[in-house]
Image: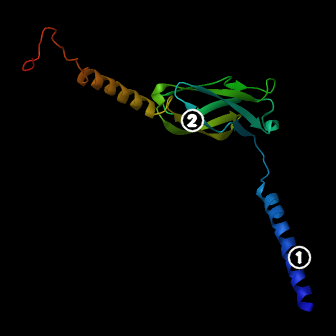
Amino acid sequence: MAQDRLLGICFSALAVLLLLIPAASASSARPLQTTFGVIINPSTLTVKVGDKAEINVTITNPEFVKGTQVCFSLDGFPSSGFTTSFNSECSDNQHGFGTILTVDVTPAAAPQTVTAYVIASSGGQSAQAVLNLTVVPAMAAWIPWLGLILFFAVLAVAIFWRPKKPEKKSKGATKRGKR
């Protein structure tokens, strides 16, 4: 009986500790922010060749950039295959701290994965957010191969297949040997 009571106390203490550990680690994991930040939505996307994507860019903690402009830029995109533009390169507090990033994927982009950085800078401070972009072909890779196979199949049939000609019977032929 004493052992059951001791075992119950041990399990209760363990349960209380397990409940307190996540709460303690969550409160210590949040650093005090003394500057602004950047959030992009979506931060990971897949785009087909020839399509375009729009990404919302917003500033967190805008109280740290009051009275100044926030300017946006990109770093990490390849020099060819993409056309990028911001709805507004710089924004101020009257229009809200945010913009829209438009990414056009040209055929020169080819299937690839790009990791780029959206950078916001204001008054000597800067913040960045990671953008992961995956480019996929406009059509499935097997479709052109299927077209080639069908083309060569039709070509082979046209070259090698000949319709059988019916045998001609002569009208005036008689059977020999039978009278």
Question: Mark 1 or 2, which is nearer the eye?
Answer: 1
Q: Is residue 167 above or below residue 121?
A: above
Farthest residue, direction bottom? 2
- Give the amino acid at mark 1: Ser
Query: Residue 77 at x, y = what percent?
Result: 53, 34
Q: In the visual, does 154 lie left or right of 37?
A: left
Please name the residue that numbered disc 2 is placed on: 75
Q: Relative to the observer, which residue lies in front, 175 or 79?
A: 175
Query: Residue 55 at x, y = what percent?
Result: 67, 31
Q: Secondary structure at mark 1?
A: helix
Q: Is residue 159 visible?
A: yes
- Give the amino acid at mark 2: Asp
Farthest residue, direction front? 179
Q: Is residue 169 above or below residue 17?
A: above
Please name the residue that numbered disc 1 is placed on: 12
* The C terminus lies in quadrant: top left
How is the model colour-coded?
A: rainbow
Residue displayed at 68% across by 23% down = 88
Q: Secondary structure at mark 2?
A: strand
